[in-house]
Image (cartoon, rainbow, N blue to C red):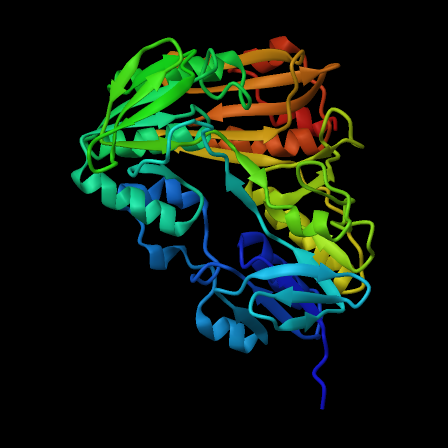
Amino acid sequence: MMQEAGLVIIGASYAGMQVADAARAKGYQGRIRLVGEEAFSPYQRPPLSKGLLLGKQTPEALTIRAPAYFEAQRIELLLQTRVESIDRAAKTVQLEGGNAMSYDWLVLATGARCRQLKLDEPSVSGVYTLRGLDDALAIQEMAQTGRKVCVVGAGFIGLEVASALNQKGLEVDVLDAGDRVLKRSVPEVVSHYFEELHAARGVRLHQGAAVAAMESDAQGAVKAVVLSDGRRFECDAVVVGIGVDANDELAQQAGLHCEQGVVVDACGRTADPFIFAAGDCARFPNPYGADPQEHLRLESIQASNDLAKAVASVIAGAPAPYSAVPWFWSDQYESKLQIAGLRIDGDEAVLRGDPASGKFSLFSLRQGSIVCVHSVNKPAEHLLARKLIEARVSASPEQLADEQFVLKQLLAGA
């Protein structure tokens, strides 16, 4: 007897796991197969650059579901399995090795991959990126014997790695081509706070630092990073964190619309009604963006989780589009940055609290409405900010700047 095709999820990622979970929770009773290239059961990625590098969490603690869960929920987990192509007409996926797999529904949860430095010389050893568990374990091992590390890139991954390695006793130089840290993600006030935080811990930040070459020793191991302006930084290892690119090649090869990510609607659907995308590979319209019709790719657990639920809602027969307020977080030393909403250049910035105290929030207003809030060590204010943004609350700069003003009052009139 031929087995049903059911739901096939390519990518045993956080998003892939959430699609499977949500499909079952919403009543889908069909077959579910979760296919992943890694050797590990689906795991949480945020701790890779935080708790795991610091030794506060073990690899086992990052696992999302125990083996018994997959059996109980009738989810077939196929690890170390690579999908080579999609045949939309036949509704099959071709696996490496020659086998094919039929589907009724197909979800792409293929994630993203780290960008690489474009250098002329042959690759050298001792250069790391951080995307998966194997990467984090390799950096963790390096940190046991390394002394001096260059981190290339001052985004969230770069700064979190710098924080962790600094706390483990390594000398750290952060090399960034921009003129301030986290430039793509936060306003200047927040950038300057984290620049001062790292500098106070002894991390050396170098801006306008474009990497031109790496020098290696006789064994081929990296020994220095050379910048385009001639500056040279000796090191035992290099960690590169200059962003990621969506793994959308399967979708492109299948003729699906991609724009640095698989383009989908608010339910995660592609132009093919039987194929969806979720997680870091998906580009979807966000109701809290400056243009709600613009398709955005959000690299966050929240976006992965909520778009996965939207995908599952269609598969389960009760479509419920993505509607959640975006939120993100970053842990660096004793500071937790939490971001709610989405800002753009030109939004009015209102500071609440003193950055020198280590606790503050920066509100972004657009046409009088709160659209984004960056909170440092203010968890309660962050949770309230998500509610204020969801309610499309308006507020005056004077109200927001006044720490004596009770922000909850703004919800009463929403």
Q: Quadrant of the N terminus?
A: bottom right
Residue 109 horizontal/vertical position (percent): 61, 53
Foreground residue among 355 and 344: 344
Q: Is residue 120 above or below residue 40?
A: above
4 relative position to 84: left or right = right
Q: Quadrant of residue 389?
A: top right
Q: Quadrant of residue 131?
A: top left
Foreground residue among 97 and 15: 97
Residue at point 63%, 36% (across, down): 326
Question: Given the current orientation, which residue lies at the most extreme bottom position?
Answer: 1
Foreground residue among 12 and 293: 12
Residue 393 horizontal/vertical position (percent): 71, 25
Q: Is residue 36 above or below residue 189?
A: below
Q: Quadrant of residue 276?
A: bottom right
Q: Is residue 231 above or below residue 283?
A: above
Residue 178 horizontal/vertical position (percent): 48, 14
